[in-house]
Image (cartoon, rainbow, N blue to C red):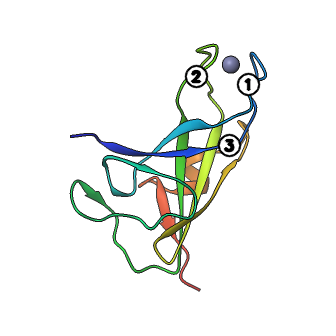
Amino acid sequence: MGLYSRIHAVVATCAACGYKDERVFQFKFADKRLRDYRVGDPLLWEANVEGEPGHMRVITSAFAEACPQCGAEDNRLYQVVIEQDHITALVNVGDEVNELAVFGPDGYRYEDY
Ligand SMILES: [Zn+2]
């Protein structure tokens, strides 16, 4: 039973070795049972659920796993955009943002407007 799920995506180049292909990102929203997603996929809500479905838009934080080529850690902060229960974007938001201010105490926030 995992405590997070994963998104496989090409987002940012590794700062250490320049690797620029697909990487794995961990996030904690919807089904956290080590589900594997790609951008465009609908979220699953079967077990270990965080949050609730049915919101217009959800913003939640994500963290990159180590670079698959050189093993370097990536401490940059990433943001998952979920619209109508589908993952629609995964973007790097840099390392100067305040995680709590951006995502709130739960690590995600709803935008229903
Ligand atoms: Zn690397």
**Front residue of this view, candidates 71 and 73:** 71
SS category of the residue bearing label 3: loop
Residue lying furthest bottom in this view?
A: 113
Distance CA(mark 2)–CA(mark 3): 12 Å
69 on left or right of 48: right
Location of the C terminus by quadrant is: bottom right
SS category of the residue bearing label 2: loop
Q: Position of residue 46 (x, y in %)?
A: 23, 62
Is the residue marked 1 within 8 Å of ligand 1, measured from its CB? yes
109 on left or right of 2: right
Q: Position of residue 71 (x, y in %)?
A: 58, 15
- Numbered label attached to residue 68: 2
- Identify the amino acid type marked 2: Pro
Quick check: which quadrant has ligand 1?
Answer: top right
Location of the N terminus by quadrant is: top left
- Identify the amino acid type marked 1: Tyr
Mark 1 residue crowding within 10 angstroms, few (<14) / some (14–19) / many (20+):
some
The residue at the point 50 percent across, 78 percent down is 84
Mark 3 residue crowding within 10 angstroms, few (<14) / some (14–19) / many (20+):
some
Mark 1 near mark 2, Cβ–Cβ under 8 Å?
A: yes
- Identify the amino acid type marked 3: Val
Q: Earlier in the sequence, mark 1 or mark 2?
A: 1
Residue beneath label 3, please? 10
Is the residue marked 2 within 8 Å of ligand 1, measured from its CB? yes
Distance CA(mark 1)–CA(mark 3): 10 Å
Q: Earlier in the sequence, mark 1 or mark 3?
A: 3
Q: Position of residue 96 (x, y in %)?
A: 73, 38
Residue beneath label 1, please? 19
